[in-house]
Amino acid sequence: MKAVAVRRGEEQPTVIEKPKPDPEDGEALVRTLRVGVDGTDHEVMSGAHGGFPDGEDHLVLGHEAVGVVEDPNGTGFSEGDVVVPTVRRAPDGTNEYFERGEPDMAPDGQYFERGIVGAHGYMSDFFTSPEEFLIEIPRDLAELGFLVEPISITEKANEHAYASRSAFQWNPESALVLGNGSLGLLTLAMFEHTEEFERTYCLGRRDRPDPTIDIIEKLGATYVDSRETPVDEVPAAHEGMDYVYEATGYPPHAFQTIEALAPNGVGALLGVPDSWEFEIDGGRLHEEFVLHNKALIGSVNSHVKHFEAAVETIQQLPEWLFEDLITGIYDVDNLDPAFDEGDDVIKTAVEFDSL
């Protein structure tokens, strides 16, 4: 079968041939439909994030997948079911985090992530997965199923953000998304259509005309250009934010978020930064936390219930969003455009098959 991989010592994806996998007991064989491409894939290819499976000279890419059950192999699925796989697996079969159904809370060394670190991904004609890590979705969502995983990431972040404010009555009205990539735009759409914030903002570094700014404003949000209004100056230019969702991986944003928050606000950090030393006024930020009851949380990955919530969420988002957000679907024989990073590229996917 064909697979899209990155080899050791290389930084570009390549098409390779691999044997069709045989499902083990408790696993289903899945025929791949589409696999999304995101910033993590680029970080993996560059060597900035992730790692190869032990003893392998390549890593099959892809962690945002949707497929069709080809062989249920004794699982509870039926042939033809459309499914989305989760990402994390236990290195030695299981551990306490997986046994509790909380693989997303496992620390480094106690998980693999398919297509990212320690385990091959889904960007191939077929893949196998244990039954408990597959989520069935409606057949009419098959073409959009690769978006379930990124939406699940925000489902988790939101859950943890609200939990951090659960000790008191928190009625957030304003939200700011840092980053106008595909995850930021999906999150902004969720804030508008499922979280029901009264006022939303999205920060980026783009000049008009720009397709991401068009989506931001079509959603009814306000675009904030960080070159004109840095994150910590947002309260003076607009308002203090009840919720800030950081999806840039730009290290200063983590600290600027504290000052961007309104009293009682919470910031969720999701971007994975490179190492960077810079000066901050630690005393001032400490004071902001204490005197204004602010909070920051970090969030990574998601688990089955977040995927299930994402399936519900994707059905509540407007159809035009996906038409504008998905800028290209490419087959394996036309791979390069799927990994382009130009300003006209928002979200792409590699297509292996169709229903």
Image (tube, grey):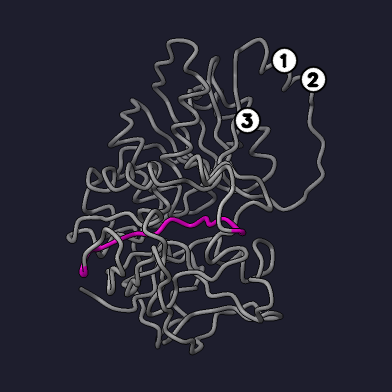
- Please identify the quadrant where the N terminus is shown: bottom left
Numbered range of the magenta stretch? 79-92
Point 51% across, 68% down: residue: 341
Q: Quadrant of residue 65?
A: bottom left
- The three-letter amino acid code for the residue at tag 3 is Asp
Point 68% across, 50% down: residue: 108
- Up the image or down, 145 lies above or below 122; here it is above
Q: Are marks 1 and 2 in contact (CB under 8 Å)?
A: yes
Residue 294 magenta? no
- The three-letter amino acid code for the residue at tag 1 is Glu
Q: Nearer the viewer, residue 79 or 1?
A: 79
Point 28% across, 60% down: residue: 144
From the image, state whether disc 3 or disc 2 is nearer to you: 2
Q: Quadrant of residue 266?
A: top right
Spatial separation of the CA atoms under disc 3 and disc 2: 16 Å
Query: Label 3, on which residue?
Result: 232
- The three-letter amino acid code for the residue at tag 2 is Gly
Residue 47, how many percent across, how many down? 69, 68
Query: Label 1, on which residue?
Result: 287
Q: Quadrant of residue 162?
A: top left
Dot 2 crowding, Cα within 10 Å, few <14, some 14–19, many 20+: few
Residue 117, how many percent across, how many down? 61, 63
Spatial separation of the CA atoms under disc 1 and disc 3: 15 Å
Query: Label 2, on which residue?
Result: 283
Q: Are marks 3 and 2 in contact (CB under 8 Å)?
A: no
Q: Are marks 1 and 3 in contact (CB under 8 Å)?
A: no
Q: Nearer the viewer, residue 249 or 102?
A: 102
- Up the image or down, 217 lies above or below 29; here it is above
Relative side of 296 to 88, left or right = right
Residue 184, how many percent across, how many down? 45, 47
Residue 81 magenta? yes
